[in-house]
Image (cartoon, rainbow, N blue to C red):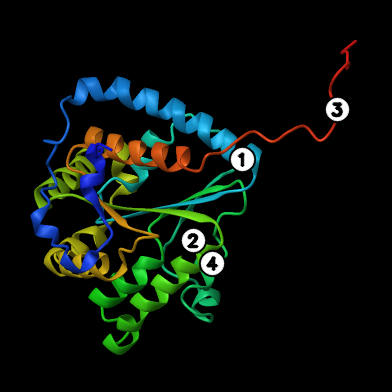
Amino acid sequence: MKKKFYESFYFTKGKDFRLSKISPGDTSLVNFDKQDAQGLLHNLNLKIDALQELLYAESKNKVLIILQGMDTSGKDGTIRDVLQGVNPQGVKVKSFKAPSAEELSHDYLWRVHQAMPAAGEMVIFNRSHYEDVLAVRVHNYVSQKVWRKRYAHINDFELMLADEGVTILKFFLHISKDEQKKRLQERLDDSRKHWKFRITDLKERKLWDEYQKVYEEMIQKTSTKHAPWVVVPSDHKWFRNIVIASAIVDALENLKMHYPESPADLKGIKIV
């Protein structure tokens, strides 16, 4: 079977992964441009909409989509563009910010487990449990002894989810430092985008090299057969959207879903 273009960004054996080998601006694997991508994305949107309705109606499978990436990498934009038109019934978006006092009083996966999809649901994580091997490591919130054990915890947690019927799609939105600068400047220049701008974004930007290092190790340690990382070149938003939408469509189609039979015999019924 011919390999699909986006499968080049799947990593199931993360130990050999090198982030530096993937160009954030690479679009060479497709033979279309930004203009063509608009029509293609529209068709993918329609497919996702229909498949999500089937997912909800069948109420059997569970889908978890994880979006990780540096500030401005396009997590919000991906949710808006790729899931455009999807019926919000049966779809949930969970954003993971700094944990609350209650969340900190539990184990670090407690708040994550509560947000998992039920049968028939699709849940999208804007950031995720991976912050507990990323931000906490970069800022030294926990010791190396603590965060290093978490790779195994997360792998075991995701294996349990997969065994329980959760389809896990993990996307790392890979942008360049220059592209981040451009997007931050756009937020600063446009008053309508000021609400997105945070002074802390500039502080995090100074830690760019450290974040690249920990993201690479995260992918190396937690890309598995049941939950591989997809590293998406994301400098071009249209390309990012096509890669992610294509992967979601294929994952949903591979579930081989069917509409359930009616619980009652509908033959002979007349609407008067």
Report the mark closest to the observer, 4 or 1. Answer: 1
Q: Which mark is residue 56?
A: 1
Q: Position of residue 172 (x, y in %)?
A: 28, 54
Splitting the image into 4 quarters, where does residue 185 fall?
Answer: top left
Cα distance in 3D space between marks 3 and 4: 39 Å
Element type where label 2 sits in the image: helix
| Contact? badges 3 and 1 (CB < 8 Å) | no
Element type where label 1 sits in the image: helix
Which of pointers 3 and 1 lies earlier in the amino acid sequence? 1
Q: Is residue 46 left or right of residue 55?
A: left
Name the residue type under label 4. His
User: Residue drawn at (57%, 40%), measured in percent from left and top?
Assistant: 55
Image quarter of the N terminus: top left
Q: Position of residue 165 (x, y in %)?
A: 55, 57
Element type where label 3 sits in the image: loop
Cα distance in 3D space between marks 3 and 1: 22 Å
Which of pointers 4 and 1 lies earlier in the amino acid sequence? 1
Which of pointers 3 and 4 lies earlier in the amino acid sequence? 4
Report the mark closest to the observer, 3 or 4. Answer: 3
Image quarter of the C terminus: top right
The residue that disc 4 covers is 113
Who is closer to the viewer here, 131 or 233? 233
| Contact? badges 3 and 4 (CB < 8 Å) | no
Report the mark closest to the observer, 3 or 2. Answer: 3
Q: Is residue 177 above or below residue 52?
A: below
Q: Which mark is residue 265?
A: 3
Which of pointers 1 and 2 lies earlier in the amino acid sequence? 1
The residue that disc 2 covers is 162
User: Residue drawn at (35%, 41%), measured in percent from left and top?
Assistant: 247
